[in-house]
Image (cartoon, rainbow, N blue to C red):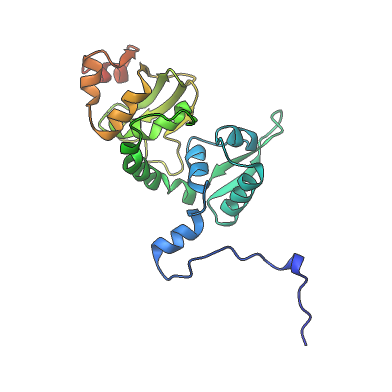
Amino acid sequence: MPRQQPAAQRPVRRRSYDQFCATARALDSVGDRWTLLIVRELLAGPRRYTDLHADLPGVSTDVLASRLKDMEQGGLAVRRKLPPPAAASVYELTERGHGLLPVLTALAEWGAPALTERRPTDAVRAHWFALPLLRALTGLAQEGVLEVRLDEGEFHVRTGRGAAIEPGSELYGFGPAPRPDARITLAAELCLELGRGEVALAEAVKDGRIEVTGEGPLAVELRGG
């Protein structure tokens, strides 16, 4: 009789819907709570564990570690060490993980109508407004890096028709850009209105709700030139 493998050494089988369906298989990988929000964070570039935990208010350290391990096993993310002198490890999305950008974009568009009022218990980070804003920037022809300033903080996005061509490229990032081609200043609520299609980008610039800074081609296009 074959010897039974000790319980501690048995491979853990992840929960599955056990359905021969593409949607069910996708949810096997990303359907757990927090997974898609981790993807949202990593879409902006590699992150250290501590940074991820800081920008995911409410997630426990155990759950975050478990989700990251699942994402590594599922081929959605990898962990790598930064070269000296950083001496730190970061998590980043694989090409398959980056393929979830349209999913997050669609979810942000679908959920935008629910953001009519900020609740007192709601946490907020400036870069969480990147996905709604990107939808309003898709018509821009000029390629470049646009810095976005909100009362909640700063982030930057890539613009232009070639912005999403390179597999695995980040369409947005945390904080101010090192060398932005243009800057815009606006309210977070306006980001949501732009994402919902309630106001046009050109209209918001024209009526002064968006302040454009810069003299390059991207700034000129944003001003309607």
Asked if residue 130 lies left or right of residue 62, the reply is left
**Rendered view: 167 above or below 148:** below
In the rendered image, is residue 69 in sight?
yes
At horizontal 33% and vertical 27% (from top left) the residue drawn is: 191
Where does residue 49 sit, x and y in percent of width and height? 63, 38
**Furthest residue toward bottom:** 1
Q: Is residue 94 visible?
A: no
Question: 122 or 71: nearer the eye?
Answer: 122
Residue 168: image location, x then y, percent: 46, 43
**Residue 108 occupies quadrant:** top left
Residue at the image point whose x is 46% and y is 46% from the top: 98
Residue at image location 32% in from the left, 40% down from the top: 109
| Residue 83 image position (x, y, % from top left) | 68, 34
Above-or-below relation of 220 to 74:
above
32 to 22, vertically: above or below: above
**Rendered residue at 52%/53% (across/down):** 32
Image quarter in which the N terminus is found: bottom right
| Relative side of 64 to 22, left or right | right
Q: Which of 126 and 183 is in front in this view?
A: 126
Figure quadrant of the C terminus? top left
- Is 2 on the left or on the right of 61, as rendered? right
Give the side of residue 21 with respect to residue 7, left or right.
Answer: left
Along the line of sight, which residue is nearer the eye, 162 or 31? 31
Which quadrant of the structure image shows residue 159?
A: top left
Q: Quadrant of residue 184?
A: top left
Of the pair 207 and 115, the residue shown nearer to us: 115
